[in-house]
């Protein structure tokens, strides 16, 4: 009986210790803190906070996939991975988080376009294979108005209306009825394009009607001129024949 009780106690201790070593996803929390609004040219600071709610230290590897138009400030060079024929940039860190503690990771990037950006979830995995991730994030880069619609910076009427008015070529169809046909829209998408097309068609019809009398006159005059030229040629030929001296044999 004592042996059986001892075996049960040993098995209970072993089982509890195995559960203590294994970090469950709910015991590890990954958060990403990021500004939701930045101006063009600003450096964006991204903070990743990993919280260990376990009663002992946990070793984890954190990976951040970064796609889009960015300049890496800190660290300067990202790692690259082949993905569906493309090289994708990413950052990773291996950290040990003490029991009931937090670990903070900070990196800095500079967005290169005025647009809405999205970052996929920060992923992490423990040394025993448990994986977990943060929520995805998004932020918007606003332009710095300078009265120039610079499409190389991603400026357009959506993200920089201060510099880019509607109806101009800015790589974005604005779909607005503003009396200007947006060259970035297909004719059916911009109501102004349909109106412009109708106005051009009406103008072409009017131009055709204006030129119609001129064409009628030309159709009448050209044959008359041809006939006159033929008659003149015949008369000239006959006169020239009469003027030639005859040679008697």
Image (cartoon, rainbow, N blue to C red):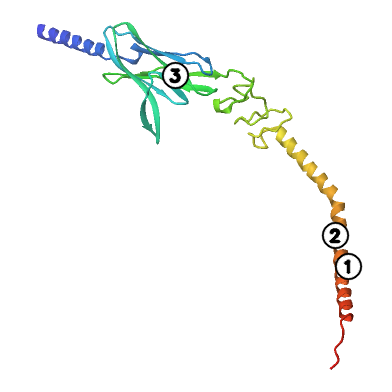
Residues under labels 1 and 2: Cα distance? 15 Å
Q: Quadrant of the C terminus?
A: bottom right
Residues under labels 2 and 3: Cα distance? 73 Å
Q: In terms of depth relative to the viewer, which is nearer, 125 or 166?
A: 166
Image height of 2 relative to 223, above or below: above
Q: Earlier in the sequence, mark 1 or mark 3?
A: 3
**Residue 57 screen position, x and y as percent:** 27, 9
Residue occupying the far bottom of the picture: 249
Q: Is residue 16 left or right of residue 89?
A: left
Image height of 99 relative to 72, above or below: above
Neighbourhood count class around disc 1 (C-alpha, 10 Å): few under 14, some 14–19, many 20 upward: few
**Residue 211 screen position, x and y as percent:** 84, 50
Neighbourhood count class around disc 3 (C-alpha, 10 Å): few under 14, some 14–19, many 20 upward: some
Residue 109, numbered label: 3
Q: Quadrant of the N terminus?
A: top left
Q: Secondary structure at mark 3?
A: strand
- Residue drawn at (53%, 22%) of the image: 116
Residue 228, numbered label: 1
Q: Secondary structure at mark 2?
A: helix
Q: Secondary structure at mark 1?
A: helix
Circle count? 3
Q: Is residue 2 left or right of residue 242?
A: left
**Residue 56 screen position, x and y as percent:** 26, 8
Image quarter for residue 177? top right
Q: Is residue 33 visible?
A: yes
Q: Is residue 173 left or right of residue 222?
A: left
């Amino acid at each position: 009986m004592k042996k059986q009780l001892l075996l049960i106690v040993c098995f209970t201790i072993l089982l509890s210790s195995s559960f203590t070593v294994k970090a469950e996803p709910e015991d590890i929390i990954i958060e990403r803190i990021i500004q939701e609004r930045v101006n063009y040219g600003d450096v964006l600071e991204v903070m990743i906070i990993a919280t260990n709610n376990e009663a002992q230290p946990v070793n984890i590897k954190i990976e951040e996939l970064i796609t889009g138009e960015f300049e890496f400030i800190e660290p300067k060079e990202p790692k690259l991975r082949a993905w569906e024929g493309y090289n994708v940039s990413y950052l990773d860190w291996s950290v040990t988080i003490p029991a009931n503690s937090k670990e903070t990771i900070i990196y800095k990037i500079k967005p290169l376009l005025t647009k809405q950006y999205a970052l996929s979830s920060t992923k992490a995995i423990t040394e025993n294979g448990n994986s977990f991730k943060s929520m995805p994030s998004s932020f918007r880069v606003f332009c710095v108005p300078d009265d120039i619609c610079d499409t190389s910076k991603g400026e357009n009427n959506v993200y920089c209306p201060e510099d880019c008015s509607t109806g101009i070529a800015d790589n974005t169809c604005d779909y607005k009825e503003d009396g200007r046909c947006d060259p970035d829209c297909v004719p059916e998408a911009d109501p102004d394009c349909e109106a412009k097309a109708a106005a051009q068609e009406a103008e072409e019809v009017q131009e055709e009607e204006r030129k119609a009398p001129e064409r009628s006159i030309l159709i009448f005059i050209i044959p008359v001129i041809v006939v006159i030229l033929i008659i003149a040629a015949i008369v000239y030929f006959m006169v020239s024949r009469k003027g030639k001296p005859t040679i008697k044999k």
